[in-house]
Image (tube, rainbow, N blue to C red):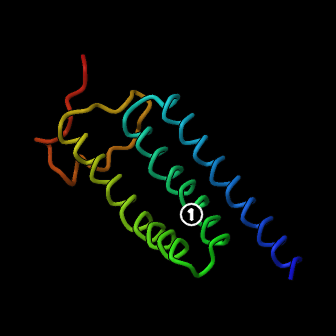
């Protein structure tokens, strides 16, 4: 029985470390990326994976206890809401006129939202 506990501890530590690495990469991306859209991508994708790694570690350690069920519920909530909220924040930034950086080549919102909502380029 002690071997199973040790294996679960190792797996839990692995997911915790992977989650923390993803969270640190998200922080670096938040500081280093050029515009709000790239930063938003870093925070939603990488931080979601980081939070899921930490929560999976908690689920493995807690098992089927109230804390494990709560961690599972939070993980499902993050999986369902993070992509949608990131998309909506990006769309709101685009509609409010936040300009992408100069190296951004693809504008998929322009045809969808119409020419009245396309941010004006600086001259």
The residue that mark 1 highlights is 55
Q: Position of residue 122 (x, y in %)?
A: 25, 20
Q: Based on the displayed image, in which of its 4 quarters is residue 1 positioned?
A: bottom right
Quadrant where the C terminus is found in the figure:
top left
Residue displayed at 38% across by 40% down: 37
Q: Is residue 115 left or right of residue 69?
A: left
For this orientation, the residue located farthest to the right is 3
Q: Is residue 47 left or right of residue 12?
A: left
Q: Is residue 28 left or right of residue 80?
A: right
Residue displayed at 15% across by 42% down: 117
Residue displayed at 71% across by 52% down: 17
Q: Position of residue 86 (x, y in %)?
A: 35, 52
Q: Position of residue 41 (x, y in %)?
A: 45, 46
How packed mark 1 is, by other alpha carbons closer than 10 Å (few <14, some 14-19, many 20 or more), is many
- Toward the viewer: 23 or 109? 23
50 vs 64: above or below? above
Q: Based on the displayed image, in which of its 4 quarters is residue 80 positioned?
A: bottom left
Residue displayed at 20% across by 33% down: 97
Numbered label tally: 1
């Amino acid at each position: 029985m002690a071997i199973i506990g040790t294996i679960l501890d190792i797996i839990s530590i692995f997911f915790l470390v992977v989650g923390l690495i993803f969270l640190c990469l998200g922080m670096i991306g938040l500081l280093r990326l050029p515009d709000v859209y790239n930063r938003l991508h870093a925070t939603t994708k990488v931080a979601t994976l980081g939070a899921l790694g930490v929560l999976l570690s908690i689920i493995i350690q807690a098992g089927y206890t109230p804390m494990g069920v709560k961690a599972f519920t939070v993980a499902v909530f993050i999986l369902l809401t993070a992509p949608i909220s990131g998309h909506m924040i990006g769309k709101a930034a685009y509609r409010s006129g936040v300009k992408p950086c100069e190296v951004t080549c693809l504008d998929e919102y322009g045809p969808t939202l119409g020419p009245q909502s396309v941010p004006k380029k600086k001259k």
